[in-house]
Amino acid sequence: MVKSIIYTLAATVLCIALFVFTEFYVGKQFGDFSAALETLYDKVENGDANREDGYAVRALWEDRKKKLQTFLPHNDISYVDYWLNEACGLIYTGNYELALGKIEVLKAVARSLPAAYGISLENIF
Amino acid sequence: MALVFIRTTIIFLTLLVVMRLMGKSQIGEMQPFEFVITLLIAELACIPMADSSVPLLYGIVAVISIFILHQIVWLADLWFRPVKDVICGKPSVVINRGGIDVYQLKKNNLNVSDLIESMRGAGYFNLDDVYYGLYEANGSFSALAKEEPVSSLLPLTLVDLGKADKKNLSACGLDGDGLNAFLKERGARLKDVVVLTVNSEGRAYFQKKGCNYEILKLGVTGKW
């Protein structure tokens, strides 16, 4: 009986710790990624972005992606991959106008993805 | 991750309520919450295992959520009697000294055929072979048997909660008119009959709504 109660409490505490950690960790990863996207956006808007800037953001995302795959469905992550690769390709060819649109989408995805797994009524149901 | 926990809890509670509402016929040898866990745990473990796009952690958190819910229900069950009654239900006495308790049967979404089937499963072939018959909270059937079985012949059900069984009537060599004549003699209408069974010697177990059962003689010609 005492053992069962201890196991239950331990499992509950572990779960709560994991929930809190996930909430902050995923938020932090996407926060960093959003900041990098903002910088890239400004550079593209000013017309002084080059392919290295795109690759730097991609390298940052690749690093974060490995960590996020434990917490988020892989389909959502590949969605970011798709738009980021498109944006990098457009920056590489110097098509800044179209690249801005792609980065805008990425910014929105980076904002909405962590929120899609947060506790809210619309996410629960 | 907390979302997985909340969603698992909601599905668990919904299934638990539905299983309780379905009555004892749907459970079979398990407490309702154990049955719900059996239903859920296979799927919870299987989906992240088979679908590589779902992180394994989702399955692990969902299974741990089920463990926590199981422990909470189990402890509540142990410590608070009213909670036990709500979650697991109470035994229902469906046969008493007066015969079949229709209210208890209906409360558990059962009919007379289900009861007779459960009795046969427990080794009793006549409704009056037992003093008391009850469905336990886990859906199994228990009975307090009489010292000797009342008959060693197999009875057929002719009327089950106001519905005549034409196949069994013809097996007994009876028709609708014969049955109506028998019921008229007893001052009963078909819809008022809880149960009427008869064996090949014509020994009939007859119970009208709101009355105790009677053992009567019914003229039958068929052999089974």
Image: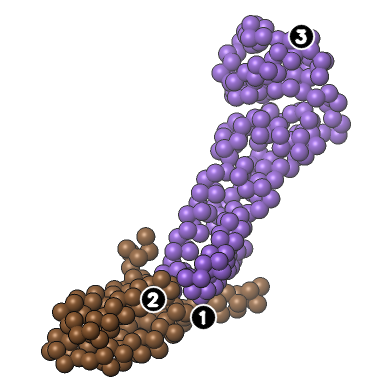
Please report contact status of discs 3 and 2: CB closer than 8 Å, yes or no. Answer: no
Pinpoint residue A53: horizontal percent, then vertical percent: 26, 92
Q: Which chain is purple?
A: B
Name the chain letter of the residue that bears numbered label 2.
A
Badge 1 amino acid: Leu
Q: Is residue A118 visible?
A: no
Residues indicated by labels 1 and 3 sit on the same polypeptide chain = no
In the figure, is residue B114 to the left or right of B57? Answer: right
Mark 3: few/some/many CA within 10 Å (<14, 14-19, 20+) = some
The disc at residue A14 is 1
Q: Which residue is mark 2?
A: A77
In the figure, is residue B224 to the left or right of A4? Answer: right
Identify the secondary structure beneath mark 2. helix
Residue, far left: A46
Residue at x 76% of width, y 34% of height: B120
Pinpoint residue B13: horizontal percent, then vertical percent: 49, 57
Please report contact status of discs 1 and 3: CB closer than 8 Å, yes or no. Answer: no
Which residue is nearer to you in this view: A30 or B142? A30
**Which callout, 1 or 3, points to the residue nearer the camera?**
1
Badge 3 amino acid: Gly
Name the chain letter of the residue that bears numbered label 1.
A
Pinpoint residue A75: horizontal percent, then vertical percent: 41, 71
Residue at x 66% of width, y 73% of height: A1
Q: Is residue A62 visible?
A: yes
How far, Cα to Cα, is label 3 from label 2?
Answer: 78 Å
Closer to the chain start, of discs 2 and 1, is 1
Mark 1: few/some/many CA within 10 Å (<14, 14-19, 20+) = few
Which residue is nearer to you in this view: B91 or B69? B69
Q: Colour of chain A?
A: brown
Q: Which residue is mark 3?
A: B219
Name the chain letter of the residue that bears numbered label 3.
B
